[in-house]
Amino acid sequence: MLTGADLLAKVKDLGDASKSDIVRACGYVSTKKDGSERLNFTAFYEALLNAKGVEFGGGAAKVGKGGRKLSFTTKVQFNGNLMVGKAYTALLDLKPGDEFEIKLGRKQIRLAPLGSTDDED
């Protein structure tokens, strides 16, 4: 399988060929159990993007299936509840049953784990 500059050069050389022929010529082919050929389009396109300098899939923090970044904001719901989502509790490694003391300050709400010595205001 070609990668990097070799891949880009081969794709450029094959300019008018079909997509299948380009993928095959670049070596992104595998053999199925029944002996037939399988073109690995996904691997080809990922290698092509990497060759062009586009990075993906190896981000710093995984945030879930949706791929959205955590905003660290929330709002009071219609019933008056304030919700902290699963992504945030996972980030802090919180488990069901963990208990917290709610500490109110000027324009802030802090959650302190029960038994902690967090006296900072």
Image: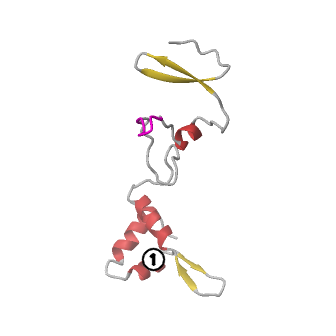
Where 28 sits versus 52, above or below? below
Where 63 sits versus 36, above or below? above
Spot occupied by residue 7 in the image (x, y as percentages of width and height): 43, 68
How many marks are shown on the rendered structure?
1
Where 37 sits versus 94, above or below? below
State the residue at coordinates (56%, 84%): 37
Magenta segment = 75-81
Q: Amino acid at mark 1?
A: Val
| Most distant residue in the left direction | 16
Spot occupied by residue 61 in the image (x, y as percentages of width and height): 52, 43
The reply, left or right, for residue 112 in relation to residue 107 is: right
Asked if the magenta segment contains residue 30, the reply would be: no
The reply, left or right, for residue 64 in relation to residue 77 is: right
State the residue at coordinates (44%, 48%): 68
- Foreground pick, 97 / 56: 97
Where 59 sits versus 33, above or below? above
Which residue is identified by label 1? 23
Spot occupied by residue 75 in the image (x, y as percentages of width and height): 40, 36
| Most distant residue in the front direction | 79
Residue 35 position by quadrant: bottom right
State the residue at coordinates (51%, 23%): 110
Secondary structure under tag 1 reads: helix
Spot occupied by residue 13 in the image (x, y as percentages of width and height): 35, 75
